[in-house]
Image (cartoon, helix red, strand yellow):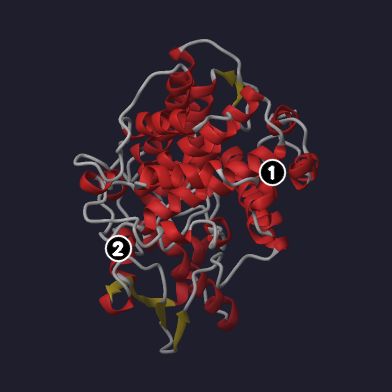
Amino acid sequence: MNAVDSLIGFVLGTAYADLPTAAREAALVFLTDAIGVGIAGSAEPSAMALRDVVANWGSGTEATVLGSTERLPAASAAWVNSFQVHCQEFDPLHETATVHAMAVLTGALLATAEQEDSDGTAMLEAVALGVEVAVTLGLAADRSLEFFRPATAGTLGTALALAKLRGFEAEACRNALGFAYSQLAGTMQAHVEGSVALPLQIAHGSRAAVTAVDLAAAGLSAPHDVLDGPFGYFALYERGGSLDALLPALGSVWYVAELSHKPFPTGRAAHAVLDAVAALGEEQGFGFRDIDGIRARVPPLIRRLVARPAIADMSSNYARLCLPFLLASLLRDGVIGTATFAPEKLGDPELLGFNDRVTVVEDASLGRDALSPQFVSVALTDGRAFERAVPHTPGSPGNPLTPEQRRAKFERCLADRGVPAAPLIRALEQTATLPSARALLELTVPV
């Protein structure tokens, strides 16, 4: 049995009843988180502009746009919602696999579940299975990111999750995966440049997954050996990677229970330093004007992503991974939120002038692509100095958010979008017994 058939056999052979309690609970927790950040993302200026673009792609009202009264064709709603989930860098991820496993999946799942009027159990089952496949593909890689793994591995995992949701048999699953593979796209260049193309790559993957299952449902045939074939995933996208050691463990370790929350709407690579400096500032009573210098010793991946200078014409996407700007904003304003990335803040001379006070040094011994541990030292103008080690990034399984912190994040995401939090939270808490996805999606619309 090849790798494609092994993954398909696992997906088709696993039901919600087979999931351990931890996986069921995590599927609900991270679906809730992704819906919350997707609603928050509807406020991004880029999301508003893109909704106007998508409205010209065709008419249809099959699916809801999160945080909006708009309805779109299912593939278009999937595109918009997944963009909104990722555009603020606020969505869950699996740190070791470097996969934002809910980004592509959430938009495509919500659109398909609403179109099919799936029940809540089927939705949670699809979350667990889609994350399992995407993270497994991420863990199979043995190179640093070149292609944007959330969009590549995430699209393939989502396609199989949707195929299961729609009741496909094995041959249709092979075609769905093949059609999804044939549409893969997305590199790290958008990340390096801080371009809005980064969340667009997530959006493309979500629409591709919906399109792939539609094509497979129509009986069309796609390439089948798309993982290990001569021009397959491990020959082109993740060269040298292999699933051989991971396939036997499918279903024994549920990766959905290993996902991390993001406490800040920024790139994950900045979170450890931000949290350490915030904690030291609270403990020692220093603020923005007391800082002489901040030094972070981090894994190479972290330095590559966040050691970018604040510049006068930077975009919000660039700023979300600009550590000097983020630290200055946190220390001066006391919070990093949606308002942090408003145009007037992005051009604030005081925030832009913090570059020289931040040094990021890479330490390869910490792990080439690791997110932690990280080490932070702060020197103050009065001569005092403090250090803080961050063995586990905040929000990760080793340093998780509390249920109260998760709820507070969700409520903040909905606060200014006109979507009442309480009824949506109650409905989400009952997802496993929810008879209709449509009833849930109705609660994501402003009133």
Q: Residue at (71%, 62%) from the top-left corner?
A: 403
Please determine whether, in this image, residue 97 is positioned above or below residue 193: below
Circle nearer the N terminus (2, 1): 2
- The percent position of residue 196, horizontal first and vertical second, equals 37, 38
What residue lies at 57% left-to-right and 72% top-to-bottom? 399
Q: Is residue 443 visible?
A: yes
In this rendering, would 161 be left or right of 376? right
**Label 2 environment density (alpha carbons within 10 Å; few <14, some 14–19, many ≥20):** many
Residue 20 marker:
none
The single residue placed furthest to the front in the displayed view is 1
Answer above or below: position of 374 versus 108.
below
Q: Which residue does the image show at 38% across and 59% down from the upper left? A: 139
In the picture of the structure, the residue carrying the numbered disc 1 is 415
Q: Which mark is residue 307?
A: 2
Is 301 above or below relative to 202?
below
Task: Tell me which corner region of the image, top left, top right, bottom left or bottom right, holds residue 229.
Answer: top left
Disc 2 and disc 1: Cα gap in Å? 32 Å
Q: Quadrant of residue 46?
A: top left
**Residue 294, position as x, y percentages in the image:** 38, 75
Kind of residue sitting beneath label 2? Ala
* Mark 1 surroundings within 10 Å by alpha-carbon count, few (fewer than 14), some (14 through 19), many (20 or more): some
Amino acid type assigned to the residue bearing label 1 in the image: Ala
